[in-house]
Amino acid sequence: MKIAFLTPEYPHALTGASGGIGTSIKNLALGLIDEGCVVRVLVYGQNNDSVFEDNGITIQQIKNIKIKGLSWFFTRKKLERIINNLYDKQQIDLVEAPDWTGITSFISPKKCPVVIRLNGSDTYFCHLDQRPVKWKNKFHEKRALQKATGLLAVSQFTADTTNKVFGLKEHFHIIPNAIDTATFKRNQEIEVVPNTILYFGSLIRKKGLLELPFIFNEVLINNPTAQLILVGKDVPDIISGSTSTWEMMRGLFTQDALLNVSYIGAVPYDAIQTHINQASVCVFPSFAEALPVSWIEAMAMEKAVVTSNIGWATAVVEDGLSGFLVNPKKHALYANKINSLLKNNSMQQEFGLAARQKVMQQFSIDVVAKESLSYYKSLIK
């Protein structure tokens, strides 16, 4: 089968910065290739039009058309022509696109099926953040869902919430994100640094980073030697207008707590594994996710996690078995769960092993690729 992915991002030096969607697409693409598929990734928003190969995946860079006020329309029509041309030449059988900003809202391929996979639309995240959404984005995202041949979601919570915010009653087939469990695997040669807490990901309000200082302040009350390590890109805060979430965080730590905090900044994707290996516990106090890849990566490396308990969380973490689920606003309780793990090495190991097993059963590339391919074939039939 010949699958195309339409995406604004892909993790490669030639295509620019990429986040969770790009990583998930690459992981799934590699899994589909192992299943005998041919995979092409159509990356729009690029500086030029070109094609190159990456680990057996054909990457097609597409430059947006810039016409004041109409760029969105003509770019979509360019993508439509590319998809139709590839389908006519029998180079693709199906196209999958993300829900973000509804890129397929005015793309009407002649016969090629179009699948939308929910990773969280702008409307979805604005709803979780309790802030207004741009009407244009909501319009395109809803239209894209209504026009799609098939609908996937990475979690049931994301599917249900999407139906709610758009006033729809669509059926979404649930298939989670995948990670490379061969790459994200504990390295026994790297020693765990005792009493260390790791957060990795963007420093942004929606991921609970303005709650984390208060949580860590509470951790130090009963565990004054604990260390907090932060790894990730500093992001401007859309609500306050601050240019730096990190600077906002600094003012929320106590003076003593700040002495035990290390902000590493953004690191190359493959470097994050070293930080995960060294951590005692990983924390993710997020308020807005669809199905967070970072949580799964930490669990794959046998790390005990303390996460938020919101919506999607139960699809990833089994409370009290592979981690702890806690409301991030309950700072003292969250800190108590962290300390219970920091002070109990055997519990860390038990949770870590259970976490790895969970990932292997549900989130590994081969499992997700097989589920996705089965769904694609059902649409072709």
Image (cartoon, rainbow, N blue to C red):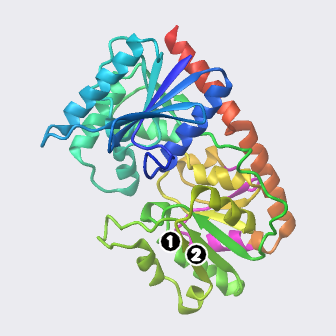
Callout 1, which amino acid?
A: Glu
Q: Which residue is the site of mark 1? A: 211
What percent of the width, then of the height, locates residue 255?
54, 92
- Furthest toward the bottom, the residue is 255
Whether residue 117 is visible: yes
Residue 45 vertical placement versus 278 (above, below): above
Q: Residues within 10 Å of mark 2 (few under 14, many from 20)?
A: many
In depth, the one of 159 and 136 nearer the eye is 136
- Furthest toward the top, the residue is 381
> Where is residue 163, by image quadrant?
top left
What percent of the width, then of the height, locates residue 289?
49, 50
Highlighted range, magenta: 317-339
What percent of the width, then of the height, locates residue 347?
83, 63
Q: Residue at x 27, y 30 (%)?
A: 76
Residue 240 vertical placement versus 98 (above, below): below
Mark 1 and mark 2: Cα distance apart in space: 6 Å
Circle 1: element type: loop
Whether residue 60 is visible: no
- Contact check, label 1 and label 2, Cβ < 8 Å: yes
What percent of the width, then of the height, locates residue 228?
63, 76
Residue 166 relative to residue 293: left or right? left
Q: Residue at x 14, y 39 (%)?
A: 67
Residue 143 relative to residue 116: left or right? left
Residue 375 vertical placement versus 190 (above, below): above
Q: Residue at x 49, y 43 (%)?
A: 22
Q: Residues within 10 Å of mark 1 (few under 14, many from 20)?
A: some
In the picture, the disc for residue 215 is 2
